[in-house]
Image: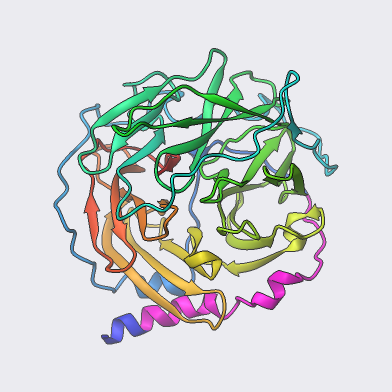
Amino acid sequence: MNRLEDRLRDAFKADADTVRPEAIRSAPMRPARSAHGRWRSRRARILVPLTAATAVIAVVTGVSLAVPLVHTPSQPAGPPTPGMHSPGPFPFPTGEPPVNNGPLPLPVLGHDGQSASKGVPSSGPTQGVPQYYVTVNIVPGAPPLNSLVVRATATGAVVGTIDPPAGTSFTAIAATAGDRTFITALSPTSSSCVVETQIDQFQLDDQGVPGPLTPLNISIPANNVEPGTLSITPDGSTIAYATSLCTRTQVGVIDLATGHVATWLGPSFDQNTMGLSLSPDGSLLAYETESYLGGNTVAILRTSAPGGSAVARSQVVSRTAAWAALGDNGTALYTCTANPSATVGPVAYGMQALAGGSQRVIASWRDLPYPQCWASMDPSGGYLLVQYPVSVKGASDWVQPAVLNLRTGQLRLITAPAYYGPADVAW
């Protein structure tokens, strides 16, 4: 281990020292923050500058890529076309909405006389890299707006697409173990902030071709507008979501086997809640909170906590990570840090234990264009599908999918086209 890696580990330790597993079990009550500001679509997502870790990462030597960058987008350089990436309009069309800190309605389990699903199929742990991954509208202008696109991980080739039902858009996606069964959120394309999101599932056959959407008969009274606002346990028994309804946000967990629903009032209106990840047993939920005014935190909520404020019931485990996900059966937090204050800069992925405070750097790269963090962990916990920043003339926030081996730190770029990101991806 060299001296620079030691310094980077010290920077990650600043977050690790804040983790107290016992506090997650019984988080201290804190007053809810006042709600103000204006909600943003995922297109306007702003990653927050880091503190100590930023300066250290800037001098870390980057990890060599397993394959060279092999594709540049064929679309003309410039800003994305309207509606290319955003799932729909802002939760309210114009003006500053009134503040409302009251609870949101509960999800409705059952629809038109049909019972809600008692679970989502799982084909068991994946051996090695998942064969297929699914994105929400990954190719600008190619499939219809907000279609789901299935791609082969080895080649990046499109295997199939699913178009949303009329009047709806796909807004989030998650996968059970085995890269064959997925759930997705369908939200109306109405300009009203009062909507209901429906949860459906679909399965891939042995060649990765997607079958039809199957309703889970679950209605959530709000809209998913950010990536990573849907999560499911590998066995398909528990679903977590984060949604917004006008001036309010909600974090919820649904136990499909028992029909039990737990909800918490989300952070204040000037903050986005995204990047959800459940522990395999569904007992812990990690989520990212990003303030419209600046500031980024990752917190963990014990899903057995009583209702009320999610902020008050959660334990902050990082104030520097721009992306995070639970791993190692819920005992570790995988994180990514970036410095978006510069047009060129470093990105680093690492791991910190939730007990004991140990941490390690998995991979880091210097001088990436438009550095940002976003990834999707496969249900087996061995790999990340990283949205790796790439250079596009006259445009920013373009990425290319890549597979990061969490054991070796090796990154392999997928030969799929670059796209405007981050997009919601599951595998």
The picture places residue 32, in percent across and down from the top left corner, at 80, 57
Q: Is residue 79 visible?
A: no
The picture places residue 148, in percent across and down from the top left corner, at 42, 28
- Quadrant (top left/top right/bottom left/bottom right) for the N terminus: bottom left
The picture places residue 407, in percent across and down from the top left corner, at 32, 68
**Quarter of the image where one finds residue 399:** top left
Q: Residue at x 23, y 72 (%)?
A: 61
353 or 82, which lies in front?
353
Q: Is residue 61 above or below residue 322?
A: below
- Quadrant (top left/top right/bottom left/bottom right) for the C terminus: top left
The picture places residue 116, in percent across and down from the top left corner, at 69, 31
- 315 is within the stretch colored magenta: no
153 or 178, which lies in front?
178
As drawn, which residue projects farthest toward the top? 166
Q: State which region is magenta.
A: 7-34
Q: Is residue 208 above or below residue 20?
A: above
- 12 is within the stretch colored magenta: yes
As drawn, which residue projects farthest toward the right? 102
In the shown orientation, is residue 319 left or right of residue 403? Answer: right
Q: Residue at x 54, y 49 (%)?
A: 235
